[in-house]
Image (cartoon, rainbow, N blue to C red):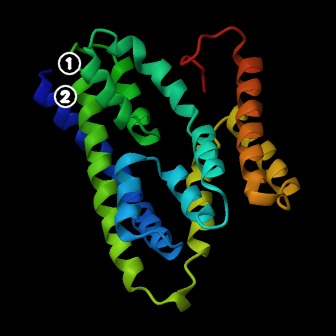
Amino acid sequence: MSARTEFIAGARAQLPILLGVAPFGAIYGVLAVGAGLSPLAAQAMSAIVFAGSSQFMAAGLFGVTPWPVIVLTAFVMNLRHALYSASVAPYLAHLPRRWKLGLAYLLTDEAYAVAIQRFRAPGSTADRHWYLLGTGLALWLTWQLSTAVGVFLGAQAPGTWGLDFALALTFIAILVPSLADRPSVMAALVAAVVALLGATLPYKLGLLLAACAGIAAGLAAARLRTGSAPVGEVQP
């Protein structure tokens, strides 16, 4: 397949996922403005951070938690991207640094889930990085546009609408489909327990502890199940 064909195929493969991503981007925009972020700051976070779960977390903690705790929590929540990177690295090793930096920025949960299937498929070509570029750009553009819609709606929405509940509903919608194996279930259970136990800690530190504990539990469960399997080759 040519580079153009790979790019178009990657963007097309992302389309079904975009139907679910767009509402989350709009909800983030509404919540971010409602939490006190300026429209420009809310949109800039989508462009710079480009990580839905971290953005929802930051919007929920903005104004009630010191910014170093928010940054550290976002860092811990996004450690899973290191596993994604390790998984795709062998397929992208031949690329120059500028390509690797660009694709690393676009490597999200949804982009990885689509691209790794293409990378591992028989007959995959040297142009397969265009597939990841196509799926990543399609997701990025949708996220920016949906955030802009949410920011506009958030600026217009009356304060009496009480949209705070959307944050919890969004996280539940993101979490439930991902509970497909024992490590993910273990991570969710441990994180939930730690979050409940640490709910009274100052500066929302219970959330940071829950994220760390959940990641550690998930990694431990995966290691017990797969033995010495290399990182990035964890079996479902």
| Residue placed under numbered mark 1 in the picture | 127
Residue 134 is situated, as x and y percent measured from the top left of the image, at: 23, 36
| Residue 78 vertical position relative to residue 127 in the rendered view, above or below | below
> Does dot 1 land on a helix, a strand or a loop?
loop
| Residue 166 vertical position relative to residue 56 in the rendered view, above or below | below
Q: Looking at the picture, which amino acid does disc 1 mark?
A: Asp
Could one spot residue 173 in this view of the protein?
no
- Pointer 1: residues within 10 angstroms few (<14), some, or many (20+)? some
| Residue placed under numbered mark 2 in the picture | 6
The C terminus lies in which quarter of the figure?
A: top right
Q: Residue sitting at 42 percent across and 67 percent down?
A: 29
Instruction: Give the mark nearest the N terminus, 1 or 2.
Output: 2
| Left or right of 83 in this view: 108 | left
Q: Residue sitting at 72 percent across and 46 percent down?
A: 208
Q: Looking at the picture, which amino acid does disc 2 mark?
A: Glu
The N terminus lies in which quarter of the figure?
A: top left
| Left or right of 236 in this view: 115 | left
| Residue 144 vertical position relative to residue 113 in the rendered view, above or below | below
Q: Residue sitting at 80 percent across and 59 percent down?
A: 202
Pick whichever, 126 or 150, lies toward us: 150
Task: Using the numbered discs, state the Cα–Cα distance from disc 1 to disc 2 in whole angstroms.
Answer: 7 Å
> Does dot 2 land on a helix, a strand or a loop?
helix
| Residue 102 vertical position relative to residue 43 in the rendered view, above or below | above
Residue 57 is situated, as x and y percent measured from the top left of the image, at: 59, 56
Snapshot quadrant of residue 156: bottom left
Residues tagged 1 and 2 counted as in contact (Cβ below 8 A): yes
